[in-house]
Amino acid sequence: MTNKTKGEDLEKTIKISNLLVQVTCSSQAKALGLLMQLIANAENEPKTIVGIELKKGDLLTTLKELSFPTGLTVSEIRTCLRKLTELGLIEKQTTNRYTIISVKNFETYFAPKKKTTELMTREVEYIDKFNEFMCSHLPKVEKMTQTRLNAMKRRIEDKTFSTMESWEDYLNKVAQSDFLTGKATKWKTNFEWLIRPSNIQKVLDGNYDNKNRITDDIREGFEALYGTR
């Protein structure tokens, strides 16, 4: 029964070229469309539905259910399934209520998933640099979460920190601020705070530089000694 969620379908990256070679060379465009539908809706993991055990790559369905998304008639569905079976691309079992279709070599139709750290090595390098610079000043980034990686990616792509050198300059400025590193008050900043655009601008504008705080200290000391007018 084709009750896949949108998210599950999006996780699959079908190797269309593989299908074209195997099917359209045999002038079976309708069969290709049906095969793609079967692959997109087949089970990702073993599962039991209405008491029927399904393997990875199996689909529990009916000819009528297959007809609606493909636009094919039930008769055309039967013809396509027969052709796909002859080509050795699927196996088919029929019960009194359902049809069980097994997509052969199911895994070969999908590109292997890459880990987040493989997909976003640049962002990981930037966050590692943060940990390197701030290890003695601020809380370390312990987990490379998707939220943190995406935030770092946005700051790289919007040219805020388009080079590692610009990122290092920013981190140096932060490290030299007594206020941001918790030397002036009990509060100290962290990675999430420092990566927000509005806060980045404040840091770059010098709002948290020590010189501003030193000026305040001198003024307060002067007023304590000599009073105010």
Image (cartoon, rainbow, N blue to C red):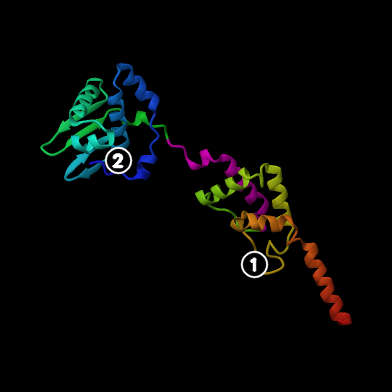
Inspect the image, locate mark 1, and give the three-letter code of the amino acid beneath it: Trp
Q: Report if residue 211 lies within the magenta region.
A: no
* Element carrying mark 1: loop
Which residue appears at 69% of the width and 69% of the height?
Answer: 185
Residue 16 quadrant: top left
Q: Nearer the viewer, residue 213 or 79?
A: 79
The answer to whether 162 is drawn above or below residue 25 in the figure is: below
Q: Badge 2: few (under 14), some or many (20 or more) residues near its Cα, within 10 Å?
A: few
The residue under label 2 is 45
Q: Residue 132 carries which label?
A: none
Residue 14 quadrant: top left
> Can residue 62 be seen?
no
Left or right for 113, reference 80: right
Q: What distance separates the C-alpha of mark 2 from that of mark 1?
A: 48 Å
Q: Quadrant of the N terminus?
A: top left
Which residue appears at 35% of the width and 24% of the height?
Answer: 19
> Can residue 186 be seen?
yes
Q: Which of 175 and 209 is in front in this view?
A: 209
User: Where is residue 97 drawn, in percent x and y?
Assistant: 13, 39
User: Where is residue 7 drawn, in percent x and y?
Assistant: 37, 45
Q: Report if residue 124 lies within the magenta region.
A: yes
User: Where is residue 92 drawn, in percent x and y?
Assistant: 19, 29
Task: State which tag comes first along the sequence, 2 or 1.
Answer: 2
What's the magenta bit mostly, secondary-structure-wise?
A: helix
How many discs appear? 2
Which residue appears at 19% of the width and 37% of the height?
Answer: 64
Inspect the image, locate mark 2, and give the three-letter code of the amino acid beneath it: Glu
Range shown magenta: 113-137
The residue under label 1 is 187
* Element carrying mark 2: loop
User: Where is residue 71 drawn, in percent x and y?
Assistant: 26, 33
